[in-house]
Amino acid sequence: MKLTAKALLATMLLTPTVISAATPATTLILHPEQATDTISRMIYGQFAEHLGGCVYGGIWVGEDSPIPNTRGYRNDAIKAMKDLGVPVLRWPGGCFADDYHWRDGIGPRNKRPTLINNNWGGTKEDNSFGTHEFLDFCELVGTEPYVSGNMGSGTVGEMAQWVEYMTAPAGPMADERAANGRLEPWRVKYFGIGNESWGCGGNMRPEYYSDNYRRYSTYLRNQPGNTLYRIASGASDYDYNWTEVLMDRIGAGRMDGLSLHYYTVTGWSGPKGSATDFDSDVYYRTIGKAVEIDTVICKHIAIMDRFDPKKKAGLLVDEWGTWFDEEPGTIPGHLFQQNTMRDAIVAAITLDIFHTHADRIRMANIAQLANVLQAMWLTEGDKLILTPTYHVFKMYAPHKDALHIPISYNAEILTDSNGRPYPTLSATASKAKDGSVSISLTNTLLDKAQEIEIPLAGLPSHIRQADILTAADIKAHNTFENPTAVTTADFKGAKTAGGKLKVSLPAMSVVTITLD
Ligand code: AHR
């Protein structure tokens, strides 16, 4: 993705503009000699909130369910998690986190209180999925937990005891944990101190939040074998003042990470548009809004750089993704939305942008894992379907923990009907530890294939693997009747010839090519 001022300038300096009828191919130049930053696998993180069918139904069905499960976790969800290699899972919210009192979710399940989920549809919350169920699930699927603590309606002592309960090898909290069936402490590194504290997490002002962060974090103690990575509740998209105040008053010495939330959404009030029924104008506006995350990230990073030039604190985009209207006929407040090829393109271009900020972005968590917003999978009873977004995450796996390779290219930048720029081509590249180089390309255009040429000097030239995700219609999506309408296929449109990799990139497609 080349929309930052820095990157656009580099592009202009390194490659002349060649878009014209006479020269239809776009030249994309990789600069492995400039590669310095590793793409943390943590940017491929997920988020599971007690919201609609995300946890209940999407992951957890309970041990007595007729749906095939292991200790209450649905088997198909376990498989999807493992196949995807989810590096980190954020829980229990979201807005739910600042209403959640962890003691409600421990001990015998039949003794746990049934409450109302006041944030999300007034649904009954029976607390059958609590701390043990979450951390056991993480262990089962090989994912790092990221726990969001309740600052909004919880006390300092409650938060401190939760950390101790999960991570202390000995002491009263450890004894209580053992009595509840878990002798060994869990390893919980990532801990969030409040969520959206400017909104559902307490409607605080940044000065007040900063003081509270300092107070709460004082009592979150590292235990032998467990060092916390403390995450401050960061800004909503364009709220740069929030970042400014937190960096000033908390500072990088007291926080390891600062979060940021950015949704590809038309607005917070009124209809957000259908997830599956939209025209080309709405499509390009979605892409324009998705790409704007780059500008937003750049501005937050510029503030962080002023206070923390050594980049001690990470920027964690711990909620991002598309937000459309709930599917007609689904439970209001449950945010169940379908997922089309449009979502796949949003996912790819957003991940491309994250890669270009690998020196500061240390984690990202798409919202959400299952059945909510831009999900990886959707469930209906015993059926589970993988979404186009899941397939993009899978195709991008070679970039995890790989060295980001800067790219210069001269793709045309168009403007959507809201005046937002978006690129016709998005690209990213990385070098893995085994020396292989993976290149992902996204054609955002609905009606035009693109020819791409990549000089291979200094790069491997054998195509090890090439995959494509595309569809005949941007609105295409998987359903319970047709679960593979949008799925990955072997890509035949890449070849090496004359020292170049030549790619014919179909309209509205995402491709990953690995060279060795
Ligand atoms: O992901 C849904 C909600 O969006 C989260 O609960 C909240 O943090 C954000 O506003």
Image (cartoon, rainbow, N blue to C red):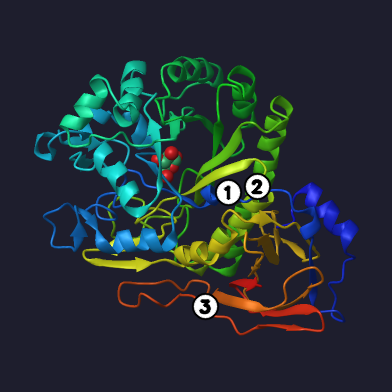
Give the mark nearer the N terminus: 3 vs 1.
1
Picture coordinates of residue 279, whole percent (x, y): 54, 68
Q: In what quadrant of the picture does the C terminus appear?
A: bottom right
User: In this picture, is 148 found above or below 400?
Assistant: above
Is 266 or 299 nearer to us in this picture?
A: 299
User: In this picture, is 474 found above or below 269?
Assistant: below
Can residue 2 be seen in the rendering of this structure? yes
Give the mark nearer the N terminus: 1 vs 2.
1
- Residue occupying image coordinates x 59% and y 59%: 399
Can residue 153 be seen in the rendering of this structure? no
Picture coordinates of residue 363, whole percent (x, y): 54, 44
Determine the quadrant in which ligand 1 lies.
top left
Tell which tag, 2 or 3, sits nearer the viewer. Answer: 2
The image quadrant that residue 504 belongs to is bottom right
Q: Secondary structure at mark 3?
A: loop
Q: Is residue 3 left or right of residue 120?
A: right
Residue at the spot of label 3: 471
Amino acid under disc 2:
Ala
Is 444 or 256 nearer to us in this picture?
A: 256
Is 28 or 477 nearer to us in this picture?
A: 28
Amino acid under disc 1:
Ser
Tell which tag, 3 or 1, sits nearer the viewer. Answer: 1
